[in-house]
Amino acid sequence: MGVSLGGKSSGRGRRRGGKAMSDINVTPMVDVMLVLLIIFMVAAPLMTAGIPVNLPRGAAQALQTQDDPLWITVTAKGNVSFKDKKVFDNDEYPMGDLAPRLRAVAEQTPDRKVMVRGDREAQYAAIIDVLSEARRAGLTEAKLVIESDPRSR
């Protein structure tokens, strides 16, 4: 801490010669950007979770897909939900609403891949109904999604 003796200022905020400092201080902006980056890194995985299902386990390799598939989830109650950025949101619907929604997807993109996530407690017939309706709608490629079993490694 210094004390100024005399009529001169301590130099805070001003350069020599009495001119105002016109440089932009970027440090607060960088701090805010880093905080936002951390918030989005933590929040991003939480936003893609969708409807929680208890997937069956099995010996399978990780899924490699380059496309944006249509995710259909079959819940333990037998309801379905769609995760699709182009047509539907991620709400639960009764199985009866399945056919018109799949036809709407097939009209927009007939070569769309379908990924079916079936809850472990869901009836096998409900999952087969989803695959059958996808085929009838014109969506020819469908895959079942399971959770990898750590014992199979």
Image (cartoon, rainbow, N blue to C red):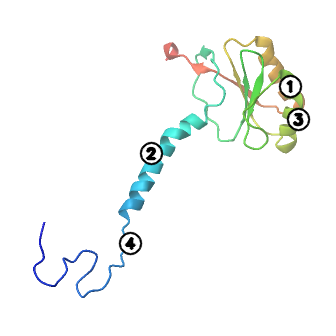
- Kindly indicate whether the residue at mark 1 contacts the one at mark 3 (C-beta within 8 angstroms): no
User: With respect to residue 93, does 2 lie above or below?
Assistant: below
Residue type pointed to by label 4: Ile
Crowd tier of the residue under label 1, counting other residues whose Cα lies within 10 Å: few below 14, some 14–19, many 20 or above: some
Q: Residues within 10 Å of mark 3 (few under 14, many from 20)?
A: some
Q: Nearer the viewer, mark 3 or mark 2?
A: 2
- Report how far apart the C-alphas of labels 4 and 1 lie in the structure: 60 Å
Contact (CB < 8 A) between labels 2 and 1? no
Residue linked to disc 4: 24
Q: CA distance from mark 2 to mark 1?
A: 42 Å
Which of these two is toward me, 76 or 68?
76
Tell me the number on the disc at residue 133: 1
Which SS class for mark 2? helix
Q: CA distance from mark 3 to mark 2?
A: 40 Å
Residue that badge 2 annotates: 38
Distance from disc 3 to disc 4, alpha carbons, whole Å, reads 56 Å
Q: Mark 1: which amino acid?
A: Glu
